[in-house]
Image (tube, coloured by chain):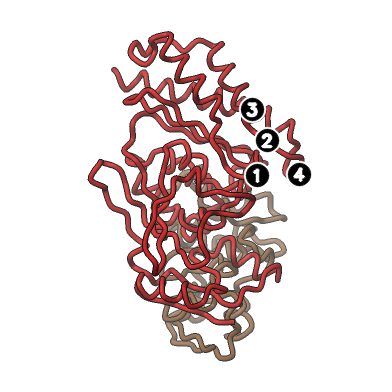
Amino acid sequence: MRVDLTVNGERRQADDVWEGESLLYVLRERLGLPGSKNACEQGECGSCSVYLDGDVVCACLVAAGQAQGRDVMTVEGLATDDVLHPVQTAFLETGAVQCGFCTPGLLVAVHDLLARDPSPDDDTVREALAGNLCRCTGYEKILDAVRLAAERGRG
Amino acid sequence: MEFLAPTTWADALAARSEHPGAMPIAGGTDLMVELNFDRHRPEGLLDLTRVPELRDWQRTEDGGVRLGAGVTFARVMTELADLAPGLAMASRTVGSPQIRVRGTVGGNLGSASPAGDAHPVLLAVDAVVEVESVRGSRQVPVAEFFTGVKRSSLEPDELIAAVLLPPVAGPQQFAKIGTRNAMVIAVTSFGLALHGDRRTVGAAIGSAAPTPRHAATAEAFLAAALDEDGLWESRGDLPDATATRFGDLVAADASPIDDVRGTAAYRRHALSVLARRTLGWAWHDYRGEAA
């Protein structure tokens, strides 16, 4: 089947989509957007977090056809031209990136959190990021990144 | 494989009737896992996310709530904390933010997992599942809805339209055991409702029997114990012995198995603790109501 959707502000079309495949597969394999990572394929790790009509979801759990006509934003949509989003800069500066596999999903989740709550306390951050697993950092650097991005966002 | 995407409830029922091999999909948080791992290959998917009738909830005439099957856990948490406190509590424990924003109460029922997070509370409050097909609509008490592990009384041409929640009649609680706070399938779970208006107790267990089910012996014991001691009216101290006995009876009402998530013995023990603890919290709330 054919799926038409908006991705990062652009109208995109995917052809020959199998009815049972996920939005994640469409993004990575059909639309050339490998930023969203394919890890657990069961909604546990958050590496494939994307916005779907404004909600952060696991792209691996959205059937391709469910994204027909919808608006998707992936990690590729955060930066503008050559300028990183402040959340991305904060991750780099605090060392919140190690192997980097969880980073795209975390960036999307943190982007969403700070848009809703510019000054989250640590408990709120931990709760908001509970669906994003990182096996490298022990999360402390990620919390530092969120604090830094929040501080700059307010300043 | 077919992908059916009806945009009205009538079209959804027609599609369900004409394509009984197409699996209904809402949030996809269970079904997409099955597809991703190639554990299950249905003849088609029947997408219900474009059916507006499923997405809303309304107050009912009796003061309860008619919760559309497609209302997400995220919305139950934020919109129904007062009208469905137990279900809102259970919703907060579902998966992660990404899962709660997609997963629906109707989907939870449709999957009919013994570990479904919504189920114990729905049993405890005596919720009713409204199911419909092109043949008509019927109402199924939640206790009769679950018929086995991941099996329900839904007919092949039926869809879940809504869940009917009675008016809140007293404190409600939910608790669940898992290896961490987020992203866990319950090792065991427990829902409790004290129906002060009619002096009955709703208590139900999850993940500790082939289906979610009432802890019927424990329910009857606690209601009678509160009656005998005049505690429904006095709202006095709850004797420790009553709470402990209640916990023991809840554990005895379960029939858990050993599996990868935990042993049967652990599940029974955990249930007795959850039951005693949630009763403590609920009783605290019940006493506070009088003040």
Q: Is residue A143 above or below residue B36?
A: above
On the rendered image, what quadrant is the N terminus of chain A found in? bottom right
Dot 2: few (<14), some (14–19), or many (≥20) neighbours within 10 Å? some
Q: Identify the residue under disc 1.
A: B210
Query: Regarding mark 2 in the picture, which secondary structure is present there?
Result: loop
Query: Relative to residue A124, is residue B135 drawn left or right?
Result: left
Q: Which chain is red?
A: B
Instruction: Please name whichever residue, B288 or B200, is drawn nearer the observer in this view of the structure.
Output: B200
Q: What residue sits right under mark 4 in the picture?
A: B259
- Check the residue under mark 3 and report the chain it is in: B
Relative side of A83 to B244, left or right: left
* Residue in view at x 58 percent, y 16 percent: B245
Q: Amino acid at mark 4?
A: Asp
- Asked if disc 2 and disc 1 are in contact, CB closer than 8 Å, the reply is yes
Q: Which residue is depicted at the point 72% across and 44% down?
A: B261
| Depth order, front residue of A46/A75 | A46
Return the residue found at the far front: B135
For the residues beneath circles 1 and 3, the answer to whether they share a chain is yes
Q: Which residue is mark 3?
A: B251
Chain where mark 4 sits? B
